Amino acid sequence: MIGLPRDPVFKVKINGYNRELTMKVTKTTLMASALAAVAGGAMAQEMTIVSWGGAYSKSQLKAYHEPYSEKTGITILNDDSSNEAVAKLRAMNEAGNITWDVVDVVASDAIRLCDEGLAMEIDHDAMLEPAPDGTPASEDFGELIVSDCYIPSIVYSTTFGYRTDLVGDTPPTEICAVFDLETYPGKRSLEKRPINNMEWALLCDGVAKDDVYDVLATPEGQDQALAKLDTIKDSVVWWSAGADTPQLLADGEVIMGSTYNGRLFSVIEEQNQPVAMLWDAQVFDIDGWIIPAGLDDERKQRALDYLKFATDTQRLADQAKYISYGPARASSAPLVGQHADLGIDMAPHMPTDPENAKNTFLYNYEFWADYRDDIDAKFQAWLAQ
Amino acid sequence: MTDATQSGPMLAADGTPLKKSLARSLRRRKLRALALVAPLLLFVMLSFVIPIVSMLLRSVENSIVAETLPLTVVELKNWDAEGGELPDEALYAAFTKDMVAAVEAKTHTRLGTRLNYEQTGMSSMFRKSGRKIKRLDPESDAPFKEKLIEIHDGWGDVETWRTIKTHAVPITNGYFLNAVDMRRTPEGAQAQPEDKQILIKLFGRTLFMSLIITGSCILLAYPVSYLLATLPMRVSNLLMILVLLPFWTSLLVRTSAWKVMLQQQGVINETLVWLGLVADDARLVIINNQFGTIIAMTHILLPFMILPMYSVMQTIPPSYTRAAKSMGATNWTTFWRIYFPQSIPGIGAGSILVFILAIGYYITPEIVGGTKGVFISNRIAYHISSSLNWGLAAALGTILLAVVLLLYWCYDKIVGIDNVKLG
């Protein structure tokens, strides 16, 4: 809203109100209506899009925002609040003033927003572009549409990176290296929450992949996972921000650590650190868009128009030029090309690449929606011991 | 004035009783004073009092169950939770009716989230069942008991209905019980299972570490403030800038700088290894634990201790210490009997500031505290922004507020709040 007083709409409206003013109208209401006029006038030209910031927002800016602004003349304002989007949307909803138009959230947050009635339901086939060959959007996205309110845009994974110079002659090839302190002594970084860590622990404690969530649903299974994590607890640095592990790896503080695959890509390819990926047992997760519930019709239409553009087959493939996350549409995969600056092929760096995706997990949204509070309390109590 | 009232009414120049006239003019003055402070008062009300009161209310407010399932809650009153028998058809019919309306208004999933805090699995049960119950007709599809149990076997579990009944009250103590590692059950308040007890421990740790941080701030700030107050103006101004410079730097920058200093491949460890004081494979662990939090927070909060101490010490006349010395007191006696007692109000003010700030800190512990150096405020932040259990976060915040007020009261009783000076 910077620079609005110079907006011609603003002046015209103010003059209009001035002429109609009677003595009864107090200054306050004048100001309120002037503000409303400003807001109304400005919003025809602007929309606020919420995302994660950093390299990720930059990739969206290049692939979606800039072409869209060029096409329509709408100014896009970025707000890097995605990590607290659910809490903020809830507060906005309670205050009855929603200032965001489109919000980028991970799938589990989208499910919660949908559950709380804070996100609008989407009719994927009616509102989004079909694939170039005519496949309807809902089929093109397939099972990645994990909530009625959600438009997926990328598939990312949480996986491990390791220091190639610190692991000796036998670089790790499978996930259980994380729990193997004898072969790979040194610190490892794990996220300070139970999600993913519990699954990896069970997997390396001999639980079959298909049984992991059944086991984890029982108190005994949770204890088993924590007991496995106990074996490496003293060698773990716990992270809470996605940038922590890349930094810890670059500093040599840890010899391996989990983080998002795009972060590792930038450490390896853009910053040329002696780090390599361990794709084994990577956990797929989805990032994408929601539209807050309760927008007026005009803003809703604008948000939908933007999303129709930003989630078509070509645009999703374009984003992969700037960051190594896989496009959510099946039809985008063949269009993924080279990195915009480095000129390297992006396909082998995608988590969805067949070579990398030999052994994968898909984040179990339903399970964690139910068990998150329960297991988190246990996990935090275990951490504090 | 007392004499005047006792010896009959005294009249003002215009003939009204002096008392009345005085009261009138006082009232006018009070109104004017009120008008002057009104903007501030309004600001404090809007930005401080109202949010705190609304937070206090949130920690007990629980109308969601009765609002989403009004008919069910009425029926549940007649159901015997202790009997171990499933409720009868009337309750299932009422529940279906409520759910159909709730699914229409999309509030059933919100209720599921709320009840999931109490019983794991409720969230998906409400979400899954919602889709199917929507298709039932509350009038013609009776009876419902079998149908609901077929939709999700959770509806055939006595425990489900006991949970709903227990939490159907509009005002609950459930969040406060959770905040002290207990829970609300049909049999009354009970302790949480041992492997989920964490909050009391965190409260204790927060208080203990805040005390240590306050103590180390006192030790470090006292000599610095003394120097600031006694050195010549030119030197002390320079020192003052050194104190204030970090104060003006972003909190995150300072905390991250400590990370660079303290980590195992960091500046301190590298220097010690280079000097040969520490073996390369036995580097000190001074970050991601309580030690890291104490160091970083002591540094960050130090100016809050130095500034009040300095301004109090500045007012201590140097002639007192000179007088003591001239009468034969040793340096130590002079300091301990003359100077120190006069500087106590500064220590008191600084300690209160630092302690209260420390107790509510969460960014610094989150970054350098690892797992054993985090505070209760990190849990509050988690429940506000991640788990969205705002009721529990509010209860934790309320307890923290009460603890601070209690400590303030104790301080007043022991040291005396009149003994606190900011200069």
Image (cartoon, rainbow, N blue to C red):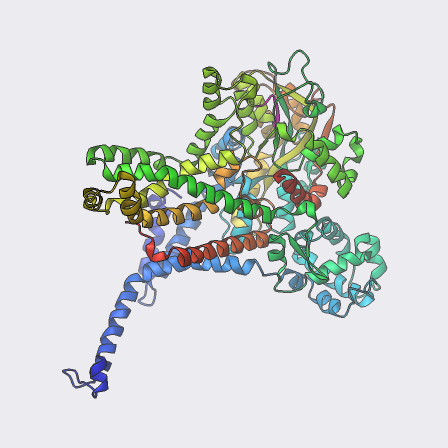
Residue drawn at the location 65% of the way across and 19% of the way down: A348
Residue A323 visible in this rendered orientation of the protein:
no
Q: Main secondary structure of the magenta part?
A: strand
Residue closest to the eye, A346 or B232: B232
Picture coordinates of residue A272 (x, y %)? Answer: 54, 16
Picture coordinates of residue B384 (x, y %)? Answer: 55, 48
Residue at the extreme bottom: B8
Which quadrant of the view contains residue A198? Answer: top right
Name above or below for residue B46 compared with residue A103: below
Picture coordinates of residue A127 (x, y %)? Answer: 63, 42
Q: Is residue B82 left or right of residue B202?
A: right
Q: How many marks?
A: 0
Residue drawn at the location 38% of the way across and 39% of the way down: B219
Name above or below for residue B244 compared with residue B96: above
Residue closest to the eye, A175 or A233: A233
Stretch in magenta: A254-260
Q: The N terminus of chain B lies in which quarter of the figure? A: bottom left
Residue at the extreme left: B13
Residue drawn at the location 75% of the way across and 62% of the way down: B95
Residue closest to the eye, B259 or A22: B259
Q: Is residue B76 magenta?
A: no
Residue at the extreme front: B328
Residue closest to the eye, B341 or B208: B341
Residue B14 visible in this rendered orientation of the protein:
yes
Q: Is residue A31 left or right of residue B202?
A: left
Picture coordinates of residue B267 (x, y %)? Answer: 45, 22
